[in-house]
Amino acid sequence: MVAAPVAPGADVTAEIIRLVDVSRVYGSGDATVHAVDNVSLAVNEGDFLAVMGPSGSGKSTLMHILGCLDVPTSGEYRFAGEDVSRMNERELASIRNRRIGFVFQQFHLLSSMSAWRNVELPLLYRAARDRKQMALNALAQVGLTGRVQHRPNQLSGGQQQRVAIARALVTDPTMILADEPTGNLDSRASREVLEILTGLNKSGHTIVLITHDPNVAGVAERVVEMADGRLRDRVAA
Ligand code: ADP
Ligand code: MG
């Protein structure tokens, strides 16, 4: 990494995620499950982190906490400096809408809408005058300028996921959180999607990628592994 000149008093690296001893417990008594068990993690602006682990290891539970879809049972979660671990549902929704771009395995596009209408959707909650232009810019960033009027069923799986990435990008989020983004794609489309995520990271976006696939995790600069709710850094072989 090249050190950039820093103005006096400026943050050298902004911390986007800070988890301190975070646990998420389901159930009680004999049925208690420590789905996330005392996890501490820091992610800085511009990082590209992959979270790996087998089924049942706690990845989705951790993702829900990172994405402000759920709050920890105990421990502290700071997102871009704000303590989100004690926020109510309305406050969490505001963080999600303004600060986090989500990409899911199943794309979650609206089938009756064109690509650009889908990408505009997150902007409808804002007073955005230039929604269409912002949506078209985001679609250009994922190489879909020629497909903006197409509906999802007129696009390949890889193109649909690129629309979903454009929708995640269009609000200029603090972090992009991708949960198994290549899980429904063939190897070529997977490569394209990972190239786009890598390119977005190179242009400064913070990315957290959840996957069970070591080849997918391999594009990230840092890989952590979940096992039985615990997190550890993966040491390169
Ligand atoms: P992964 O995404 O890695 O497959 P999950 O986070 O979905 O793992 O699950 C972690 C553990 O927590 C599993 O043992 C799972 O059965 C349990 N679990 C997940 N969600 C719930 C829930 N809503 N209620 C009870 N147990 C749950
Ligand atoms: Mg899961």
Image: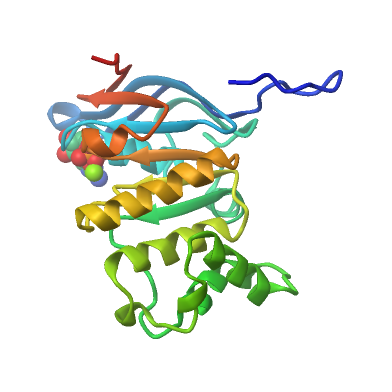
145, 68: nearer the viewer: 145
| Residue plotted at (72% across, 73% down) | 130
Q: Is residue 36 visible?
A: yes
Q: Position of residue 234 (x, y in %)?
A: 29, 18
Q: Position of residue 110 (x, y in %)?
A: 39, 76
Number of marks present in the image shown: 0
Q: Is residue 204 above or below residue 3?
A: below
- Name the quadrant containing residue 162: bottom left
Q: Is residue 177 left or right of residue 190?
A: right
- Name the quadrant containing residue 40: top left
Q: Position of residue 60 (x, y in %)?
A: 29, 41
Q: How is the image coloured?
A: rainbow
Q: Is residue 108 visible?
A: no
Ligand 1 quadrant? top left
Q: Quadrant of the C terminus?
A: top left
Q: Is residue 223 left or right of residue 45?
A: left
219, 51: nearer the viewer: 219
Q: Is residue 50 above or below residue 88?
A: above
Q: Position of residue 85 (x, y in %)?
A: 52, 34
| Residue plotted at (78% across, 21% down) | 5
